Image (spheres, helix red, strand yellow):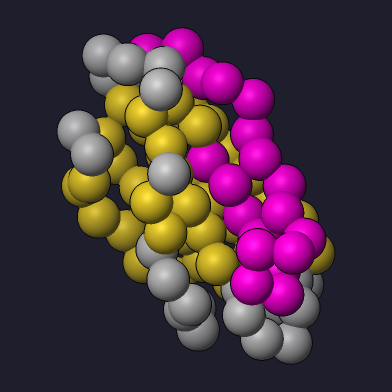
Amino acid sequence: MMPAGEFSTLGSTYVGGGYFEWGVTSSTVYAKYQHYSRTHRATACANGQTQCLRSGNAAPSYLANAVRAKSKSNNTAWWAVL
């Protein structure tokens, strides 16, 4: 699993062979990851890594999406290729 790090609004990048998007809205933190040839997942965390919600394992080409309530700080997002 790889982190996006702490962020203030949103970001996106191609990483690990797939496309990763992350962000914080007015009430949530989210992570989205899509890989076209491998099973993968996404994780969104509040309060560092203490309050995380992980997507299910997504089949190749399907979007892995994780969304949870944000905290005041230490919101992070992660991707993983399985």
Whether residue 13 can be seen here: yes
Q: Please identify the quadrant where the C terminus is shown.
A: top left
For the residue pair 77 and 49, the one nearer the viewer reads as: 49
Residue 24: image x %, image y %? Answer: 59, 71
Residue 25: image x %, image y %? Answer: 64, 72
41 to 59, vertically: above or below: below
Q: Residue at x 42, y 71 (%)?
A: 5
Q: Assess whether residue 54 is covered by the magenta stretch.
A: yes
Q: Residue at x 51, y 19 (%)?
A: 58
70 to 56, vertically: above or below: below
Quarter occupied by residue 1? top left
Which range is magenta?
42-60
Q: Residue at x 42, y 59 (%)?
A: 3
Q: How many marks?
A: 0
Residue 36: image x %, image y %? Answer: 28, 19
Q: Residue at x 58, y 38 (%)?
A: 65
Quarter occupied by residue 62? top left
